Image (spheres, rainbow, N blue to C red):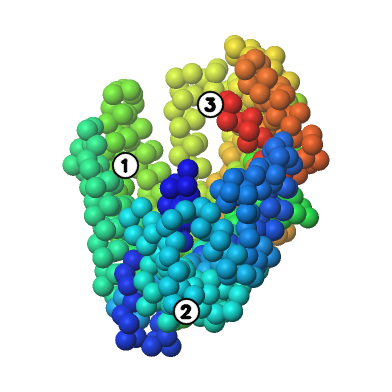
Amino acid sequence: MRKAVVFCLAATMLWSVALRAAPEVRAADVKLVGAVSLAGYDDMKADLDLMGDMIGRPELATMLDGMMALATRGKGLAGIDKTRPCGVLVGTDGKHVGGCAFVPVTDMEAAMGMVRAIARGRVTEHDNGLYEVKGPKKSVFVQEKHKGWAFIVDDPALLEYVPEDPVEALDGLNEQYRVAMRLYPANLPAKVRKQMAEKAREHAQRHMKRHPRENDRQYEARKTIARHIRKQLAIGAKDLEQMTLGWNLDHTDRKGVLEAVFVSKEGSETARFLAPAARTRTTFGGFTLPGAALTVRGTGRRVPLPDAELDRLIDSWRERVFTKIEKRARDDAEAGKELVDEVLEVLRDTAKAPVDDGAMAVRLAPDAITLISGRFVADGATLEGVVKKAVERAREKHPKVVDRIVKLDADNIGRVNLHLISLPLDKCRHREVLAEAVGDRLDIVLGFGPRAVYMAAGRDAMRSLKRAVRRSWRMSRRTVKPVEMTVDLGALAESAAGCPVERVQARGKKALELLEAAEGRDEIRFTVEAVRRGVKLRLELDEGVYRLMPECRKWK
């Protein structure tokens, strides 16, 4: 037990130390490469109190005290300041990389007494208050180099470069997050950056093996996409100045927040590319539904594939689709290929556009299942023409069926034409349940605007889609976050509770019971928002998510 504790302490504190710093380097020459911040013991214990309450384990905080008492042989965190943060700092002089861990202390002698209780016989005191703690493979050295801070290193020479106040080096990380890590890739030595880039390329190559059923064209198309993605990632990595990953627990709103922030160098290609993100506008801002279980919207710039590579990709898709058409629709193969060619041309033009925009919302209430969606396309009129041609060809073979379920030009809103497909449910297995949720027939609406395609299905599909389009027009001048997504667990649980499959129904009812204690705080929200020279990814988990976690583990 004691060996495991000593090993874990040493590994945690020194995981980031790669090479020893050169002794002749001045402290002023050292640049920060990375920092890790951990909230003080009291804050962590308060978080465990809240977390324990949310997941039905109120004993978590008490267990932490018990574990600490057991590990320290009853001494507890003697000599440690429980109110201040601890962490790790990693720096470089441009050639070497070295680091230290730091812990706030009120009484260094008492703190080392605690360590002695953990690592009996492995602690040696040297001159100037320097302690050596022998681990399974190597020793670490501890010293209160500056008043109130104990620093842990694997080489005593590194103590010459530790900051007087390590919290200042955290640059606010400890105030923003309970647990956080910040990296400064631009400060890494050029040799280290080159090695990391080479390893990334090797990793990518290992995952680009040919699939058994791929032909030459399909394999080359997949490699084309992979090369394009790797190129953009390489540019982003080269331009990256700072990356932060942090977690916090909001005690007021009872939710957990995980953030990742990426900031690029001033004047870099990536900074210029991301600059318009703060002025993002969308054509689909009104695509929401009351009581929606899922709402998603993504809007922003993209880097299109070069024309030659895009042509190869389109040709690969054409070959694959044509092969399937020849197998399944021999008599109408040529007509089908003509329609596919028209669709692929629109896809090509859409992929060449430097912007992307789309949204979707899904309502799953037992008495109202509805889906609405819309996305940008380069030529909505051509796609509408393809649909009308397909319907006319189907009518030639099955006129009665097509006339009964399809109504072209059923409605319109402005320059958006709406077409209706109405499918009877009389032969469906769960007809009664479906009829309650969507009506006697399943309505599917396809809409086409000059530069957009729309779809809606389910209860009040036509009315819901028209309302979303109108709302989107009114909101088109507003700035929005590039990405927004919300998952309502309460709505999902309610839908599952009404499912005719008994196992799903039972889980839905159990989930509703657990979510009642969250008092409506039961959403998962993900956003991407613009920051200066970069972006912030934010994931919020409401109290209800944590209440469901223990139950979800039982469902595996």
Image location (x, y in percent) of residue 174: 62, 67
Residue at 60% in and 12% down:
429
Foreground: 236 or 105? Answer: 105
Which residue is painted at 63% across and 54% down in the image? Answer: 76
In what element is the residue under mark 3? loop
Q: Is residue 387 above or below residue 496?
A: below
**In terms of secondary structure, where does tag 2 sit?**
helix
Q: At label 3, which amino acid type do we have?
A: Lys
Tell me which corner region of the image, top left, top right, bottom left or bottom right, holds residue 155: bottom left
Q: Position of residue 374 (x, y in %)?
A: 58, 47
- Distance, label 2 to label 1, CA atoms, is 72 Å
> Given contact means CB atoms under 8 Å apart, are the residues at marks 1 and 3 in contact?
no
- Which residue bears the numbered disc 3? 556
Q: Is residue 283 visible?
A: no
Q: Who's the residue at 24% across and 62% down the image?
A: 198
Give the left or right position of residue 71, taking residue 270 as reference: right
Where is residue 289 drawn, in percent x and y?
72, 42
Q: Of callouts 3 and 2, which one flags the residue occurring earlier in the amino acid sequence?
A: 2
- Earlier along the polypeptide chain: callout 1 or callout 3? 1
Residue position for label 1: 317
Q: Is residue 79 left or right of residue 213?
A: right
Mark 3 packing: few (<14 Cα in 10 Å), some, or many (20+)?
Answer: few
Amino acid type assigned to the residue bearing label 1 in the image = Trp
Mark 2: amino acid: Asn
Examine the rendering and report whether any part of residue 395 can be seen: yes
Eye-nearest disc, 2 or 1: 2
Sequence-wise, which precedes: disc 2 or disc 1? 2
To which residue does mark 2 refer?
128
